[in-house]
């Protein structure tokens, strides 16, 4: 109760602040995945061979004959960025909590906000497991997939700041809802398949890391085939909306999904044909975050939760103001 009183003393976050914090959450949650890919492609995954310390007895990189200084700092820098992600996540919680104090009906907003620091803690544990197991490919895959979930939740949080908390009313017919669910499921399958390609690929985070023992050509075909499924579902969704109608806002979100997904698919094909160069790997990870954000935005635009009631503090009753 005392903590809630302290939060109540904070300035009420403006609409601009609310939006800025949610966008920062999307950027940091997606960005930590990109920097993680930099750690992987530079072979710096075991630059800090222990966790939570970098070396036994030191939280920071130290001169060591077996580890290059640069790889140590690349890995350590990625760990430091977790602190930035955590600060943004904490600010999202404080903003949502402050809003709920004035608008008690905004419980859903607070729950979504809490997934941000919760995800940071989970990622720290998963990251420690990844290091302590010597970067086994499936632990790296879990680490990446956790980031994709957090990018999705951060996007939902952005929209939650600007909408109400009524039961969602879908702006698309029943069949459209089914196709949207199928679209999200297909996206998830593409992401999971992508981690198997990464697991069998040349960039394991450390030269001695064992790779996923499966033909990368087959895994790449599966990954690409699932992207085709995603695009087919997306096309079916558009054809249905041409028959039943859709709002201009939905069509704009829909066009963005197509643009981002096609760009990501093209990048993946180029990356594979060029032998998976390091630079393109990180751009591909960034592209995956963009696809998630675009798909989540389309999902949110397809339903209505009523008008937002928390853009400003709750009005103080006139008699209460007089009593003060």
Image (spheres, rainbow, N blue to C red):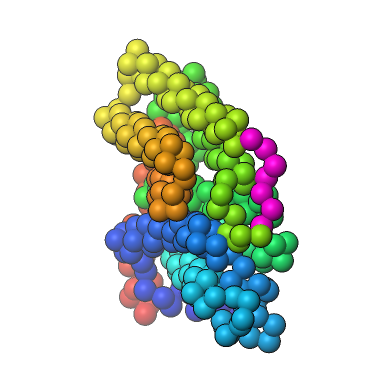
Q: Is residue 168 left or right of residue 55?
A: left
Which quadrant would residue 127 be assigned to in this image?
A: bottom right
**Residue 39: in sight, yes or no?**
yes
Residue ranking furthest to the left: 248
Which quadrant would residue 318 be assigned to in this image?
A: bottom left
Decide: is 100 above or below 296.
below
In this view, the residue in front, 317 or 159, is: 159
Residue ranking furthest to the top: 243
What's drawn in magenta, residue-wise? 209-215
> Residue 233's spot in the image, x, y percent?
47, 23
Decide: is 257 above or below 281.
above
Q: Is residue 214 magenta?
A: yes
Q: Quadrant of the N terminus?
A: bottom right
Number of marks in picture: 0
Residue at image position (37%, 57%) is: 23
> Residue 246's spot in the image, x, y percent?
33, 24
Residue at image position (53%, 49%) is: 148
Residue at image position (32%, 16%) is: 242
Q: Quadrant of the C terminus?
A: bottom left
In this view, the residue in front, 70 or 154, is: 70
Q: Is residue 160 magenta?
A: no
């Amino acid at each position: 109760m005392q903590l809630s009183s302290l939060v109540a003393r904070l300035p009420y976050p403006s609409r601009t602040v609310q939006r800025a914090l949610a966008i920062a959450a999307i950027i940091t949650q997606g960005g930590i995945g990109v920097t993680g890919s930099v750690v992987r492609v530079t072979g710096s995954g075991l630059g800090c061979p222990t966790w939570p310390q970098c070396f036994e007895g030191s939280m920071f990189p130290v001169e060591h004959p077996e580890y290059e200084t640069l790889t140590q700092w690349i890995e350590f820098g990625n760990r430091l960025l977790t602190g930035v992600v955590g600060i943004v996540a904490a600010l999202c919680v404080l903003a949502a909590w402050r809003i709920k104090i004035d608008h008690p009906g905004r419980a859903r907003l607070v729950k979504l906000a809490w997934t941000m620091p919760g995800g940071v803690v989970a990622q720290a544990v998963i990251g420690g497991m990844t290091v302590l197991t010597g970067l086994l490919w499936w632990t790296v895959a879990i680490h990446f997939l956790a980031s994709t979930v957090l990018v999705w939740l951060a996007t939902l949080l952005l929209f939650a700041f600007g909408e109400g908390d009524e039961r969602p009313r879908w702006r698309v017919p029943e069949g459209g809802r089914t196709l949207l669910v199928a679209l999200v499921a297909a996206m998830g399958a593409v992401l999971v398949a992508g981690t198997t390609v990464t697991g069998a690929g040349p960039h394991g985070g450390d030269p001695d890391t064992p790779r996923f023992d499966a033909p990368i050509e087959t895994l790449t075909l599966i990954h690409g085939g699932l992207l085709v499924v995603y695009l087919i579902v997306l096309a079916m969704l558009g054809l249905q909306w041409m028959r039943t109608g859709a709002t201009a806002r939905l069509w704009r979100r829909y066009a963005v999904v197509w643009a981002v997904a096609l760009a990501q698919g093209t990048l993946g094909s180029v990356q594979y044909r060029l032998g998976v160069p390091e630079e393109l790997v990180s751009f591909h990870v960034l592209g995956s975050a963009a696809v998630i954000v675009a798909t989540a935005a389309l999902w949110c635009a397809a339903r209505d939760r009523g008008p937002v009631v928390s853009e400003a503090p709750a009005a103080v009753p006139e008699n209460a103001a007089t009593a003060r």
